[in-house]
Amino acid sequence: MQTRNLCRSCFEALDPSVDLASVNDIERDVRGGKCQYCGAEPTTGTVFYGIPDITKEEVRRWCAKCAQDLTEFANQPENKVPQDFDGQEAGMERASQFFSDRKRREEEFMRQRVAERRPKR
């Protein structure tokens, strides 16, 4: 999986065939809440449509700092999504377990990062 953060004009230039109505829906959903990790104003986000029988659809929102932390997390070797999941039952079970474990690690990583950024009292 690859993530890019593009402004609207660069996004349109990259693929002019993209349905901009869906982009507007995502932008509206991102503005409709707070960063899911620290509660700050979100600067980015996504609608994660899920993987059938593995993960559910969800709107995710991040502030700029949490987005940087998430990128760092995703770049750690143990968090890279393996490419060997097949459509067979055993492969789907491995995928489900991987994404469940990765989500747990991501949440813990982000709790630690947000705690480190909070002012000491």
Image: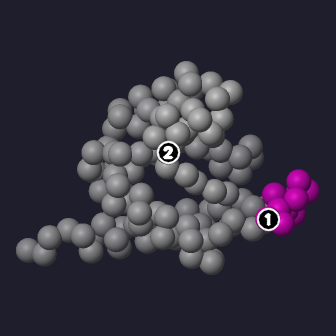
Tell me the distance, in whole angstroms, between the alpha carbons under discs 2 and 1. Answer: 25 Å
Residue at x-position 26% and y-position 50%: 40
Determine whether 95 is above or below 120 in the image. above
Q: Secondary structure at mark 1?
A: loop
Q: Are marks 2 and 1 in contact (CB under 8 Å)?
A: no
Specify whether residue 53 is in view. yes
Q: Secondary structure at mark 2?
A: loop
Magenta segment includes 91: yes
Tell me the kind of residue under disc 2.
Leu
Q: In this rendering, would 26 be left or right of 66?
A: right
Determine whether 76 is above or below 44 in the image. below
For the residue pair 47 and 91, the one nearer the viewer reads as 47
Q: Which residues are magenta?
A: 83-92
Q: Which residue is mark 2?
A: 6
Q: In this rendering, would 2 be left or right of 71?
A: right
Tell me the kind of residue under disc 1.
Gln
Residue 65 drawn at (x, y percent): 33, 60
Magenta segment includes 103: no
Going from N to C along the chain, the mark reached first, 2 or 1, is 2
Residue at x-position 50% and y-position 70%: 73
Q: Main secondary structure of the magenta part?
A: loop
Determine whether 4 is above or below 102 in the image. above
In the image, farthest residue toward the right: 88
Q: Which residue is mark 1?
A: 83
Specify whether residue 36 is in view. no
How crowded is the residue under tag 1: few (<14 C-alpha within 10 Å), some, or many (20+)?
few
